[in-house]
Image: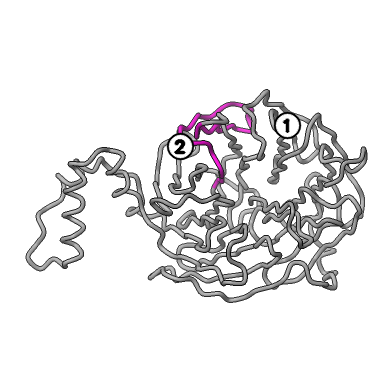
Amino acid sequence: MKKVQVPGQENDMTYASFNQDCTRVCVGLRHGYRTFCIEPFRMVYEKNCDDGASIFEILFSSSLVVHVPAGEGPTSSQRIVRIFHTKRNKEITRMTYSSTVLAVKMNRKTLVVVIETAIYIYDITNMHLLHTIGPTPPNPAGICSLAPCYVVGDPRGTGTLNYFAYPGNAASGEVFVYDVSNMRHVTTIAAHTSAISALTFNYAGTMLATASQKGTVFRVFDSADGTRLFELRRGLKTYASISSLSFNFDSTFLCATSEKSTIHIFKLDQSAATGPAPAAAAAAQPAPAAASSWSSYLASTASLAASYLPASVTDVFSQARSFAQISMPSDVSGVQVLGALWGTADSCGVILVTSQGYLIRYSIDTEKGGECTEIARHSLLAAYVRDTTEDHAPDAPGE
């Protein structure tokens, strides 16, 4: 549920995002915006407008959408947020801010608008302003995450946490977690030593994944108390600009995308959990049995060796590597990619949107991992006839 912004690209796409349950993809264009159903793939909404879209979001599969124009005029400024009812073709409300709107996030309870040094929290059922956080540390990229509060088969999201996260420091990797239902600061997480580049909650809001500007290590925290749960490593030397992080429905996998040619999917199980210090772990290891495999012996030896190394080095031994990967096809490699996971531990897949305007779906072998299999590819920029069955989508909340 991150965005792909591609200023200067030759194609027509300016923005892309997934909805809260990853059944829809929203596409901002230089002269309008579109919504697609992912499975089966079809265009379900399209609007042409001269002021384009710098941000375009939809609330689940409802008729409520948010549009931030891409123009510079008084009625098409990027300081404007429009709330629109697609079924009635009617603007519900319009809000104007003191500076450029950098992000808009929604779930069934809350709408959050982010500008560089302030955050505005609204009741989505009536669009009343509930609270303003500010001034915040400068956040020029609008990095933030609102928990989807989504549970499969439960529209009310029972047991979820309505949390919002944003960088707590412009220079270091500090993250603030805020309860947008009770308007209170929940916790501060020292996630990384360098500045934050990506944040995302799991569907229930109970976990928060983070990445820094280096893009080599990802961490997953308990969102309520900041406990580090998992530490995951993409690589050792090559830095990357992380464009998205995404959990699957039951938080058993995490996907990380960047401009690099490989997409990484990590398995969030005991092998990836943050455990005891390497020295303690090595001491607790029994001696290898005579019948142990050569790989087991090497793993035991590496663990023992780690106990004598500095903490900065032993961290590398304890950080889990990706369970599955996607090697991007040559015709779409080297571009910015937005990713989302669907499914559970037993059946899971990846949906990618590239800044070239493609939606590509992959399946994951949840038992063996390895290279994922491409199962479908669609253009988001081609000419389509709108599917009118979407006219029966649920109304917006509170109507």
Residue 126 counted in the magenta span? no
Secondary element under disc 2, as helix, strand or loop, is strand
Q: Which numbered circle lies on residue 46?
A: none
Q: Residue 309 in the image: x percent, y percent?
A: 21, 41
Q: Residue 153 in the image: x percent, y percent?
A: 60, 58
Three-letter residue code for mark 2? His
| Lower position in the chain sequence, tag 2 or tag 1 | 1
Closer to the camera in the image, 20 or 78: 78
Q: Which numbered circle lies on residue 192?
A: 2
Q: In this rendering, would 127 be left or right of 233?
A: right
Q: Which numbered circle lies on residue 120?
A: 1
Q: Residues within 10 Å of mark 1 (few under 14, many from 20)?
A: some
Closer to the camera in the image, 111 or 27: 27
Q: In this rendering, would 208 be left or right of 61?
A: left
Closer to the camera in the image, 155 or 18: 18
Q: Residue 258 is drawn in which quadrant?
A: bottom right
Provide the residue span drawn in magenta.
Answer: 172-201
Residue 177 counted in the magenta span? yes
Three-letter residue code for mark 1? Tyr
Secondary element under disc 1, as helix, strand or loop, is strand
Q: Residue 41 in the image: x percent, y percent?
A: 71, 72
Q: In this rendering, would 174 be left or right of 320?
A: right
Closer to the camera in the image, 322 or 151: 322
Outermost residue to the left = 290
Q: Residues within 10 Å of mark 2 (few under 14, many from 20)?
A: some
- Residue drawn at x 21%, y 46% as measured from the top left: 306
Query: Looking at the image, is mark 2 or mark 1 nearer the viewer?
Result: 2
